[in-house]
Image: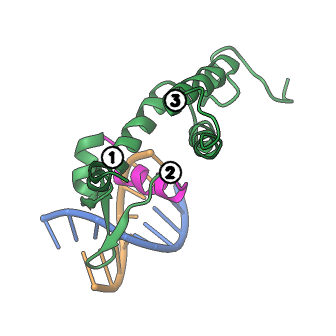
Chain colours: A green, B blue, C orange
Amino acid sequence: MSEKELRRSLSVFPIGTVMKLTDLTARQIRYYEEQNLIYPERSEGNRRLYSLNDIDVLLEIKDYLADGLNMAGIKHVYKMQKEDEKKAKDKKPLTDKDVRRIFYDEILSQGGLSQKNPFGMKGPKL
DNA sequence: TTTCTGACA
DNA sequence: TGTCAGAA
């Protein structure tokens, strides 16, 4: 890991700062942590400390949310990203960003993981 | 004052 | 998700 990455991973921001930087509520930020989307560290009196990396992820999540993805969809995106990191050790025809973009488009076009079906319905309901 | 956890409309 | 309570 490069020194730059180490710095990005240094957890130093309290939730209040992250709220301002991401425009997310404390409730949402804590919720995304529960969903294992970010891993803030703890310090003084059990307070969460976020890294620049966590903030980036939070901003990405905000983008996905803005495009209509629900938590399942977002978790799917990150799940794919992780799985790709492993496969990437052998071969890497696409960058992480490309892969994410592909699944992202797939999910949106299929509308399977959108918060609200812009067209009507999907499931077993009539 | 700020943040934490748990819980409920 | 918002918000309130009670405690660090």
C6 displayed left or right of A85? left
Of residues A125 and A57, the one drawn nearer to the viewer in this rendering? A57
Q: Quadrant of the C terminus of chain A?
A: top right
| Disc 2 residue type (three-letter) | Leu
User: In this picture, which residue range is highlighted in magenta?
Assistant: A23-36
Prevailing secondary structure of the magenta residues: helix
Of residues A2 and A123, the one drawn nearer to the viewer in this rendering? A2
Q: In this figure, which residue is indicated by the disc labeled 1?
A: A55
Q: Is residue A39 above or below residue A94?
A: below
- Between circles 1 and 3, the one closer to the viewer is 3
A3 displayed left or right of A100? left
- Between circles 2 and 3, the one closer to the viewer is 3
Tell me where residue A98 appears, x and y as whole percent: 53, 25
Q: Is residue A80 above or below residue A37?
A: above
Alpha carbons under labels 1 and 2: distance apart = 11 Å
Q: Is residue A26 magenta?
A: yes
| Disc 1 residue type (three-letter) | Ile
Which element carries disc 2, helix, strand or loop? Answer: loop
Most extreme residue toward the front is A90
Q: In this figure, which residue is indicated by the disc labeled 2?
A: A37
Instruction: Using a 10 Å C-alpha cutoff, classify the residue at mark 1 as few (fewer than 14 neighbours), some (14 to 19) or many (20 or more).
Output: many
Q: Examine the rendering and report whether any part of residue A119 can be seen.
A: yes
Q: Looking at the image, tell me whether mark 2 or mark 3 is earlier in sequence order.
A: 2
Q: Examine the rendering and report whether any part of residue A116 can be seen.
A: no
Which element carries disc 3, helix, strand or loop? Answer: loop
